[in-house]
């Protein structure tokens, strides 16, 4: 357990009961349940931006960058947990909660930063999808980006995102090829263990940029927005349409959230670790210290798949990309409508939430347009992580304040362990970004 729980006040009288576990939204059955929802969720968290960033880190710094995985794990867990807890207990999404609690001069810069980060991240991920599919399909990358974005947007507007998720989350499992590739590359176990606990880095601008990029892509602002709002969406799906009905959380609900968060982040971190390990063992010793193309990133899978490495890499990027891009564009829509004091929900039809769905469409169009500016797709994935890294500290700072505010959380304020991990994460992320800016100025 992440924190000792205190008794919670009874929920409001008109709070409808939640669906039983076997029928609750988001639950799976059969083989999918056997595989484990947490495993799939964790794999899907490693979006194309994350893959590009971790692969670049391994190629540039080799095994000397493995230490970032165990450092990031508790940070990933606490960030996702407090965002989920905020939505679950307070009953509103992140920016709706910030609007309720803080003045507009705090709200609007936060909305602008998160919104811009979502747009840039969506653009980079669409570019990553295009670059990966270009390994298999002889079409220009910009054209592939347009087609992929059109398919994703059509499925969102037509209300079939659930179908999209079911179809593509299996493709996310292709990322486990990096686990096998890391093993089959036969690294020295002693050196792997040593480099996991002892960093080998010179803290110059390149290293600091990569650290901030890894922090940003692992703790992306869109994760906060999405996680808090998905807790609200689940409540709405259970018939709790009014805010008063959604406030509060049972012990069982919070326990389920902790289990899912810990399981998902453990598997996400495992993929992170193995991507750095596989590229650090295969690309770095060969002198490929800069990944400029999807083909170079795919070559890290050659110890496992040989000539099929391109296919596995493309499937993994496309699978997680088709999961992540809707999360980012929808996250941007949540940011905007909540910042303006409006409502928006995936349970509403487009005609009932015109601003919400219009924002999704507009963000998708802008994200596609950014791919026509001529940026290198693989480098854009890394720099999108850097942009996200700058938005992490202030948003996490506000989340920690809100989840310790009894006016918002009642008796469900954070316990000692969550506060220790949360405030330490705030300090580390602030320090990393300050050091990076300092290195740019000095350099």
Image (tube, grey):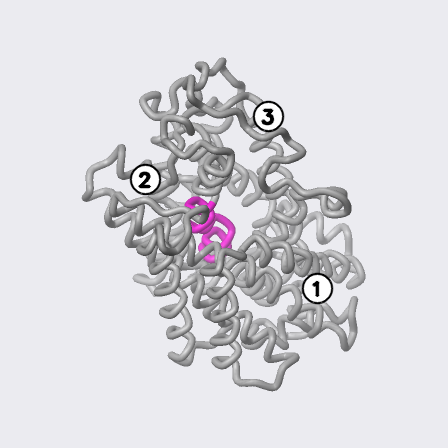
- Say which mark, if any, is on residue 1: 3
Q: Residue at x 64, y 70 (%)?
A: 314
Under tag 1, what secondary structure?
helix
- Give the percent coordinates (x, y) of residue 303: 78, 68
Tag 1 residue:
281
Which of pointers 1 and 2 indicates the residue nearer the eye?
Answer: 2
249 left or right, relative to 67? left
Tag 2 residue:
96
Under tag 2, what secondary structure?
helix
Which range of residues does the magenta coloring cover? 212-226
For residue 366, above or below residue 397:
below
Residue 215 part of the magenta segment:
yes
Seen from the viewer's position, the closer of residues 30 and 249 is 30
Q: CA distance from mark 1 to mark 3?
A: 36 Å
Seen from the viewer's position, the closer of residues 288 and 107 is 107
For residue 329, above or below residue 145:
above
Q: Quadrant of residue 419?
A: top left
Q: Residue at x 76, y 50 (%)?
A: 190
Residue 83 part of the magenta segment:
no
Q: Main secondary structure of the magenta part?
A: helix
């Amino acid at each position: 357990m992440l924190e000792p729980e205190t008794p919670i006040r009874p929920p409001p009288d008109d709070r409808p009961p939640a669906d039983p576990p076997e029928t609750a939204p988001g639950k799976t059955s059969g083989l999918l349940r056997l595989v484990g929802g947490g495993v799939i969720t964790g794999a899907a968290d490693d979006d194309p931006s994350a893959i590009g960033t971790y692969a670049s880190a391994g190629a540039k710094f080799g095994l000397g960058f493995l230490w970032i995985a165990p450092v990031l794990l508790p940070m990933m867990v606490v960030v996702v947990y407090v965002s989920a807890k905020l939505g679950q207990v307070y009953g509103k999404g992140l920016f709706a909660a910030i609007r309720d609690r803080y003045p507009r001069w705090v709200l609007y810069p936060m909305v602008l930063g998160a919104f811009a980060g979502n747009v840039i991240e969506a653009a980079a991920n669409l570019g990553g999808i295009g670059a990966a599919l270009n390994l298999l399909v002889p079409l220009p990358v910009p054209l592939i980006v347009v087609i992929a974005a059109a398919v994703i947007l059509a499925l969102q507007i037509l209300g079939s995102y659930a179908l999209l998720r079911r179809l593509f989350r299996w493709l996310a499992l292709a990322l486990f090829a990096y686990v096998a590739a890391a093993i089959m590359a036969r690294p020295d176990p002693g050196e792997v263990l040593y480099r996991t606990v002892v960093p080998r880095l010179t803290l110059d601008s390149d290293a600091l940029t990569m650290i901030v990029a890894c922090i940003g892509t692992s703790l992306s602002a869109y994760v906060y927005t999405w996680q808090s709002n998905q807790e609200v969406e689940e409540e709405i799906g259970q018939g709790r349409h009014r805010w008063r009905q959604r406030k509060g959380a049972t012990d069982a609900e919070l326990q389920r959230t902790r289990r899912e968060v810990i399981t998902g982040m453990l598997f996400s971190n495992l993929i992170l670790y193995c991507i750095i390990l596989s590229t650090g063992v295969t690309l770095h010793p060969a002198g490929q210290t800069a990944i400029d193309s999807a083909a170079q990133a795919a070559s890290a899978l050659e110890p496992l798949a040989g000539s099929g490495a391109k296919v596995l890499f493309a499937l993994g990027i496309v699978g997680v990309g088709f999961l992540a891009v809707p999360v980012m564009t929808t996250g941007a829509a949540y940011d905007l409508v909540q910042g303006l004091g409006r409502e928006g929900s995936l349970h509403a039809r487009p005609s009932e939430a015109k601003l919400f769905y219009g924002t999704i469409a507009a963000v998708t169009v802008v994200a596609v347009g950014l791919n026509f500016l001529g940026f290198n797709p693989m480098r854009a994935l890394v720099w999108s992580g850097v942009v996200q890294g700058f938005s992490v500290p202030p948003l996490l700072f506000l989340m920690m304040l809100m989840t310790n505010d009894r006016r918002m959380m009642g008796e469900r304020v954070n316990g000692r362990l969550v506060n220790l991990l949360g405030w330490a994460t705030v300090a580390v992320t602030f320090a990393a970004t300050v050091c990076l800016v300092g290195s740019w100025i000095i350099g």
